[in-house]
Each structure stands twice: as structure tokens, then as C-alpha cells.
Amino acid sequence: MTWLDLPDDTLFGLENLPYGVFSVGGAPERRAGVRVGDLVLDLTAAAAETAAAFAPLLTAGVLNPLLAAGPGVWREVRDSVREWLTEPRYADRLRPHLVPVAEVTTHLAFDVADYVDFYSSEHHALNAGRIFRPDAAELPPNWKHLPIAYHGRAGTVVVSGTPVVRPHGQRKPRNADAPAFGPSRRLDIEAEVGFVVGVPSTAGTRVSTADFAGHVFGVCLVNDWSARDIQAWESQPLGPFLGKSFGTSVSPWIVPLDALEHARVDGPPQDPEPFEYLRTSEKWGLDLALEIRLNGHVVSRPPFATQYWTAPQQLAHLTVNGASLRTGDLFASGTVTGPERDQRGSLLELSWGGREPLELPGGEKRTFLDDGDEVVITATAPGPAGRRIGFGEVRGTVVPG
Amino acid sequence: MTWLDLPDDTLFGLENLPYGVFSVGGAPERRAGVRVGDLVLDLTAAAAETAAAFAPLLTAGVLNPLLAAGPGVWREVRDSVREWLTEPRYADRLRPHLVPVAEVTTHLAFDVADYVDFYSSEHHALNAGRIFRPDAAELPPNWKHLPIAYHGRAGTVVVSGTPVVRPHGQRKPRNADAPAFGPSRRLDIEAEVGFVVGVPSTAGTRVSTADFAGHVFGVCLVNDWSARDIQAWESQPLGPFLGKSFGTSVSPWIVPLDALEHARVDGPPQDPEPFEYLRTSEKWGLDLALEIRLNGHVVSRPPFATQYWTAPQQLAHLTVNGASLRTGDLFASGTVTGPERDQRGSLLELSWGGREPLELPGGEKRTFLDDGDEVVITATAPGPAGRRIGFGEVRGTVVPG
């Protein structure tokens, strides 16, 4: 099908084709790219080479102009890339624009406008409730009526590979009268899936669940690093702030919605039936299989299909008050946690609030992250004909503050 | 002192000189401007006319390049504007670049990067506690240890004069089993003061209280519109979201820190003594006199000098976890409320949770805002020699959703 020599089981075949931004060697120039197999197609160069109409959208060093162009152009670019990589007549012209992925440096693929983080896994919310509020109702009373969310810090969203500096802050030791100050002792991860908004909306209007694919460009992986001790002390009454704002890592490759056709499933049944504006007719649950590795060892495999609220519902909620969308808005799913113990998306849950340390092969134990720890989150999803597509990874190493 | 014919009691004399962005007539071009008296100096044109070294910073249609340039350049621009408006030899060259303020359209003066909203008025926090949580402790236990804050939506920060569309959303009627959906019935204001960050900081480092003036460019007025019913139902456990994100209005003129020399006062005494990173040696309390008008009637005069946490403390807290600053970050004080009944910065407080309607002259009553209501927040501060400087206004009218 393609003139490239791709292995049959590649996670980055022509059915995937995620977008990113990269540079080569020490060159400062950032270029749009498409990952295919273990190569990156220099999309900026290829579009110029073929004099594609969309070439001017690919020269900004970020994907934002492409994101803003909307689904018609997104499809045109995707169709063109497929054609280039399929038709042998393009082979000689495009081969110079293919770079081994091992030779590129990936960058944050888009300028993040606003960053919103949801809280849409029922299993995660139940676990958090049991750990933090053992005497209260397990789910907050609003939880099944709306997808809870808060705004995070867009300016500290960083690309995979960026070291995470352990944050300092205030924490309140149990049974102490006053807070203490110092490096966080409960540095955690949250394995999440992020949705990247392309097409803006107008203030004062809503984006319906049916308009989801008209606004959202694609999907990435997110690690919403969390300092649980800082978060616990600061969060009342206005929610998390410094416990989250020191850094949020995202994967470099944005998988377009069109690549997820075979991953789409019904979300879980919702009871009570949500308000009209949250109802959906298309299925936009996504059967993504996440995997979390800590220092090379798989510690969890959260199943994204178990999320209670789907991305179109999240987007409809985000805008139901008339809030406008901008190109580059990022909204994340919240920690993805499945029903099983080895499907939990945070160390908070995996170590049950620090009370049940996780044993790593070799005898090491962890409740929360030590300096030097490396966390890698990956995901795959069903593709056509039993194949799978990959999301790449979001990776980060903790360094002392 | 100036060759301009300024009234002695102008709030916009040479000791003020706030910056903004404006256009004239229907022209699409946005230009940097300085307000002086009832005129706007076209700063973009004046800098070009005088071949000022900083002229290239003023052509972006937003102030961001000027903000990023730092205190040395800010002072250079300010000194130049004063010289231009003082030395008669500039009069003929610059007169063509002075436009009556009544003839300009003001725009959002800067691209907002991240928007953070604090909660730093003790009187406001006490009132909110008494209204919302009458049985709980009056201040949250963390309140006097850290300036509580949350991230708001940067993409819906709008300039004064932009209509505010009443948001729809979920609310939980008292004694009802389930939430209801519809237009907010408790649309409110929050009179705040905003601080505009110019110079960015590096991720993983802190900005000390002493570095405040090295990063912050100036001050504006903020109306953090709030739908109390939406906010009350959604906020647990992650804080306000849609109850705030539909719109935040800011005044068009950014008063530079250098204009506030005579407004600087000690903040209130702080007990307990805050952690080292929150201590200050310079006084950065600000004696701003705010005024809130509802449909033309003054309903409150909040005194900003009563704020418990000062702006340098807020900035140091915001970055103590290593979170970086970007040019265009906006952080707001939180609702400004003084100790007296007629110094409350929100209708929530002025009507005591809706239980004590506010009587307007003419017999009209308000608990929260009706469609068509217009809110104007203004402020002045002490200037040199007993004069005062003005902040202009932040104005908004509620339109039905």
C-alpha cells in the first residue's frame, strides 16, 4: 500500500499519521511533521515540495494555523499525506523529507490557549473519595449530573521529556497545628487523555455534543503531575492550584480524530439521564489502552473506555455557559482509572493514599515519586483489520527542587 | 509643566500616563496609546515620529512586546512620553497624534496568557464564609497561611464595554432532589484589582517578593462576573469553573507601577507571620479607592488598602512551586471588600446572600443582576501633591442568554 518499508505491526501506519512539531540536530527551526513507522515526514517541506494549497499553514513552528483551519482542511492534509506515501511517483521527491524519529527533537506541538482538566473517571472519583473523604458520600452530589472540571495553568504545559522539578510548597502534616514548608513529599502522576481544540467558538454561544468533531482536532496523552500534600492543604475552598501548576506533560504526537474510527465505542450507561445539552447520539467513548511504566516497570494499565463522561460531553459542558473556545485549547479527561487494582491512573490510588506501597521488581517500594524516578505513559487503540495504532508516549523524570 | 491644556484636577495628568490599545473610527488598525487628560496620545505614531528606539515594541496591536521588554524600557518609554508632553518643541509634531478619548475605541490592551484569581480580602472571605458556611469556621484554616487562588479562563477575559451574556448552567435549588438547568438567577459582580505581568520567569525558579517590580508592568481594574448558583453547585471538590468562565472584564488602561508611588502603604499586620517566601520588606499595599455603580448609582466604595495579602506576596506564592510566568499573565486580587457594609465588593455580600435586597434610588431593589443592568467599577489613588490619579473604569451590561 505504501512505498515505505513499514512493518505490518507498526503502531504508526497510514491509518494513524499523528501530527507533531520537530527539529533536527541543533537547528533552531521547528517544522510540522507526521509520524509514520519509525520515521517523521517533514510536512512543512513536503507541502512546499508538492505546492500544496495548505503549505502556508505549516510554517509557524506550531500546529495552531493548521488546527484553526478546520475539518475540511484537516481531511485534505490527511488525504494528501496518504496519497504521497502511497503513490510511487512521490517516492523520490519525498524520501529526502523523511527523518528517522530517533534523530528528531520533538517540541510542544501547539501553543496552548486555555487548559482545562476534567474529573470524569467514576472509578478514580470513587477511589479519591474513599481515600480523602472516608466518611463522606463516595461521589460528590454533582458528579453524575455534570463533568466536573477546573482550569489549569496553560503556561506550564510542557512536551514529553521535559524534566519535572519537584515543587516546594506548604503542606499540613497530620496532627500538626501549623503548616510546614518544603519540597513536596507526595509527588504523583495522573495518567490522562487530552483533547486539542482546533476551531474556535464565539463567546455567548454553546458547542453542542454533535459539533465535537467540528472543533476538536485530535488526541494526545497527558501526565498531570500532582503534589498531593500541597494540593490537600491549599484546595479549600477554591480547588487545586500550586499542587498542579508546576507542570503538565503532554505527548508530542497529536492523533487526529479521523484515526480513531475503530476505537469508538459507547460510553458506559449514564444514570440519571443527563440534561439535554449533555446527551449524545454518536458514540465517542474511546477504547484506548493506556499503560503506565515507573522506572521501566509496568505499574498500571488504565482502560479509557471506562470513562463515565465522554469528550463531546466535556466540550458541551465547558461551553454551555457561553465560554468561547480558542485554537489551542486543551482539555484533559482527568485521571483514567478502571475498576481493577492494576488499572489505577495515579500513585495515590495505586498506593491507596500512601498506605499500601507499590512493590517494584527488584524489591524497591514506592508510595509517591522519588527524585530520579521516570514515568512513561503510552497508549494504543484499535485500528483497521485487527491492527493497532499508537499514541507514542509522555515521559518525565523527577529532578530535585 | 505640559504644553497640553490639562485641568489641574485631571485624573490623567503626567504623573499617571496609563497605557492601552485603541482604534479610531472604523479603522481595523490597533495602536498603543497613553491616556493624558481627555486625550489619547497615539504612542505607536509618536514613537515612530520621534524615531524612538522602542518604537518597534509598539506595532503589535497589543502591549505584549512592551510588557516583555522589562523595567528599563518601561521607564524609558515613560520618561520619553513625559518629555514629549513637557518640552514645547514637541508640541507641533505630536499634536496630530493626540485623539480625544471620546473618539477612540479601546481594546483589550494585552494578550492574556494565564489568568489567576486570588481571594485575598479578609473581609470578603469572612463574609463569604458567613453566607455560605454559617456553621463552619469563618476563615478556612489555610487562609492566613497562604493567599488562596485558582486559575480562571484567560480566553474569556474581555475589555470594558463588552456585553456580558447571562450564562446558562446547572443549579441546585434548595430542598430539590435534583439540579435544574437554565439561565443563572444569581448573576453577580466581583470588584477586583488586576496585576499584569510583563517579564517572564523560568520554570523551576521562584519570583521573590523583592522581584515584584521586575516582573509586573502595571495595574488595571477587573470585574470577575460570577454566577453564584452555578458556582455553588459545581464547585465541590475542584473549585469554581463555569460560574466564572463565561466572562471577566478588565479596564482598558494599565496604570504603570511607577505611577503608584504615592499610593503605596503598608498592608495590614499579618498574624501568624507568614513563611519566609511570603515576607516583604517594601510596602506594596495600595491605597486605591474603588467605587461600584449599578445603573448609575454608587452602591459600594471598597478600599483596596484593606487587602490582607499584597500583590508581591501573591506573585511569590504563584511561583513558589516553580511555575513559570509568561508575558501577559494576569493575576487579580479577588473581591475587594472593606470592613463596612457599604464597602463590599459583590452583590452576594451587599444583599447578604440575597436575603437583604439592595434598595436603589427610585425604589428599585436588587439582590443579583437583572438583564439590562449596567455595572461600572472605577478607582482612583493618591498622586503627588494631594492630587489623585485615575484607573478609568471597567463597565459591563448584562444581556439575556
Image (cartoon, coloured by chain):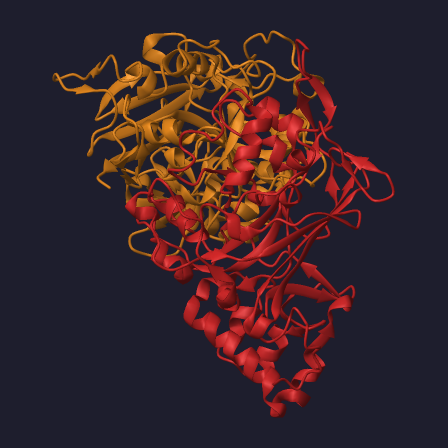
Chain colours: A orange, B red
Depth order, front residue of B139/A262? B139
Depth order, front residue of B26/A134? A134
Residue at the front extreme?
A: B340
Residue at the right extreme?
A: B362
Name the quadrant containing residue B18. bottom right
Residue B240 visible in the snapshot = no
Residue A222 visible in the snapshot = yes
Vertical order, A203 against B313 (above or below):
above
Number of dots carrying numbers: 0
Depth order, front residue of A234/A301? A234
The structure residue drawn at horizontal position 37% and vertical position 41%, both measured from the top left corner, is B271
Q: Is residue B362 left or right of residue B219?
A: right
User: Which of the image's four quarters has the C terminus of chain B?
Assistant: top right
What x and y, as percent, mark residue B386? 59, 71
What x and y, as percent, mark residue A25? 29, 52
What x and y, as percent, mark residue B96? 71, 82
Residue at the left extreme?
A: A362
Depth order, front residue of B311/B385? B385
Q: Is residue B44 left or right of residue A219?
A: right
The structure residue drawn at horizontal position 41% and vertical position 48%, both measured from the top left corner, is B269
Vertical order, B368 against B182 (above or below):
below
What x and y, as percent, mark residue A192? 42, 25
Q: Is residue B157 left or right of residue A118?
A: right
Q: Is residue B348 left or right of residue B209?
A: right
The structure residue drawn at horizontal position 62% and vertical position 29%, both measured from the top left corner, is A213
